[in-house]
Image (cartoon, rainbow, N blue to C red):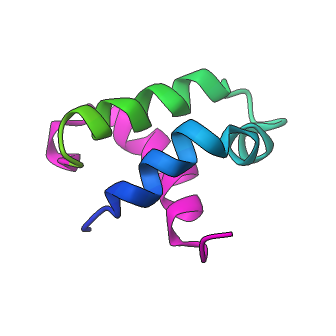
Amino acid sequence: MEIDMRRLRNLISKQRDEIERSVEGTGYLARTVIGVGTFLLDNEGNIDLLSAKQLTTFEKFLKPLLEQPPR
């Protein structure tokens, strides 16, 4: 999957409330999801560098948010 880095950067920096809503009631922390997103930003969106847990977090929370049309 090719990550839209601009969309990811916007999600992490300006739309954290969307991340917080997506993790609400799941037992995950928003800061964990934000950390995975930041890691991807730092590594040019290279998903192959994610650990198994990070990949699960990405697929469960960030990927669906990135696939939504931008607001």
| Extreme-bottom residue of the structure | 69
The magenta span reads 46-71
Residue lying at the far right of the rendered structure:
25
Q: Is residue 55 above or below residue 39?
A: below
Measured along the vertical axis of the image, is residue 49 above or below residue 63? above
- Residue 36 lies, in percent from the top left, at 41, 32
Q: Is residue 28 found left or right of 24 in the rendered image?
A: left
Name the foreground residue: 42 vs 28.
42
Res 27 quadrant in image: top right
In the rendered image, which quarter contains the N terminus?
Answer: bottom left
Query: Magenta segment: does it hold 64?
Result: yes
Expressed as whole percent of the image width and height from the top left, the position of residue 21 reads: 80, 44
The count of marks equals: 0
Point 35% across, 64% down: residue: 4
Q: Is residue 53 above or below residue 63?
A: above
In the image, what residue occupies the spot 45% across and 25% down? Answer: 35
Q: Position of residue 42 (x, y in %)?
A: 24, 32
Residue name at image x 81 percent, y 37 percent: 24
Image coords of residue 5 (percent x, y): 33, 55
Quadrant that contains the C terminus:
bottom right
Asked whether, in this view, residue 67 is left or right of residue 54, the answer is right
Left or right: 32 in relation to 44: right
The answer to whether residue 60 is magenta is: yes
The secondary structure that most of the magenta stretch takes on is: helix
